[in-house]
Amino acid sequence: MFCKATLLSVALALVASATPIAQPNGIHIPLQKRGSLKNQDGTFNAEKVARELVRVQNKHRQNLINLKQNVGEQAFNKGASIKPLARLPEHAKRGGVPLTDQENDLLWTGQIEIGTNKQKFTVDFDTGSSDLWVPSKSCSSCGSHAKYNPSHSGKKQSGSFSISYGDGSTASGTPYTDTVTVGGVKATGQYLAAVTSESSQFQSDPSDGLLGLAFPAISNLQHDPFFFTAISQQTAPEGRFGFKLASSGSELFIGGTNANLYSSDIEYHTISSSNGFWQIGGASVSVSGQSVADSFDTIIDSGSTIITAPSAAASSFWQNVYGAAVYDQTQGLWSYPCSSPPQVSFNWGGQDWAISAEAMSLGETQQGSGTCVGAISGGDLGLGDNVWLLGDTFMKNVYTVFSVDDNGVGFASLA
């Protein structure tokens, strides 16, 4: 049963130590950012970007399937629909040769413990999904990942868990309940999935599993996510968590916000839907100070890298950017002159929140071309007619707060 209590907050720091550090009204745990959509020389990697776009589309396809099952289609945004499973375009494949680094997920990872015997796992933290899953000890296809042994304190539950992606990657397994600890915050009887089968893509992934930070409505397991459980058990100081995502000093702060990391008041915006996403409305986007789209909704998703807008909205956006041209119509990607990056900012009725030139670029098309691929893509994720998905491309520029206490998402200037 889903609880109605407030949500909790977690903290991640991009540091060498793996020891959680307690602070007043919150805890932060070490995080690492893995992967990049660029090649080592900083140029655009077409296959990585294609895999990322397919992964994100199929992640949210599964979220909509979960939402329909848990709540019903009445919770869908206007125009939202469950799309066919997306597939990796043939032109983006390397003749069947697998990637050598497999860094396509590009998420933010940290360590958690499962079981009263404190089994350690490195997981991705994702505000765009709601379930916890890790490999099971019975998984023979899970590579060198840490594997969960439920014999100490786990209890097997009825049902099943599965996720699948259009490039052939899959994960499926069995639900359990057990004690889960994140940065010293403990949830007992927490539902999780012990994955018994992984695809070859997941086998070589640097993280062991994933911990979702969104709402119960999109849970595949149909039970409260970790943070909701922890709040109901009163093990979290506050019902909010704050993200700083950067090349260094990154942090996810549990149980409050870390005031040392931001320099302005937090500007909160009310959740605009009960569909299980961290979704806020009334957004506009500007290029060089001129609004080019307004009155749309945004889903703030730490588990996505690129900003994805509906195809028509993305086309309209790029038509207002000097020198922009279609780069890959199939993937909804546009390019622009590297020497004159667009000055882009988002606004929800308050401050303008700018995106840096570095964050806007997915890399030069090739060394010396002078043409960069933009990090705002166009595509129909099925999330709704007027819904944009804002991932790390946006979040790396602000301190972001996800708050059940305030029923909203907040932004503050980075210190």
Image (cartoon, rainbow, N blue to C red):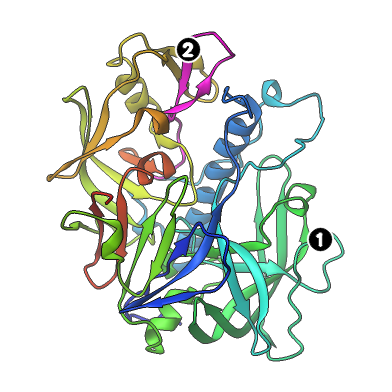
> Up-down: is 385 above or below 244?
above
Q: Which residue is denoted by mark 1 in the rendering?
A: 144
Q: Secondary structure at mark 1?
A: loop
Is residue 413 depicted above or below 112 in this figure?
Answer: above
Q: Position of residue 263 (x, y in %)?
A: 21, 54
Q: Position of residue 402 (x, y in %)?
A: 32, 62
| Residue 224 image point, x, y percent | 47, 76
Left or right for 13, reference 138 = left
Look at the image and give the residue range highlighted in magenta.
361-384
Q: CA distance from mark 1 to mark 2?
A: 40 Å
- Going from N to C along the chain, the mark reached first, 1 or 2, is 1
Q: Is residue 138 left or right of residue 50?
A: right
Q: Total number of numbered labels?
A: 2
Out of 370 and 93, give the one closest to the viewer: 370
Query: Is residue 74 found inside the magenta-colored segment of the image?
Result: no
Q: Residue type at mark 2?
A: Thr
Q: Is residue 405 visible?
A: yes
Seen at 44% across and 30% down, the residue is 375
Judge by depth and name the residue closer to the eye, 111 or 410.
111
Q: Residues within 10 Å of mark 2 (few under 14, many from 20)?
A: many
Q: Which mark is residue 371?
A: 2
Q: How far from the left and from the top, in percent, is residue 288?
A: 21, 22
* Identity, as a three-letter code, of the amino acid under mark 1: Ser
Judge the density around disc 1: few (<14), some (14-19), many (≥20) Cα neighbours within 10 Å. few
Q: Horizontally, is 343 left or right of 334 in the view? A: left
- Answer above or below: position of 370 versus 28: above
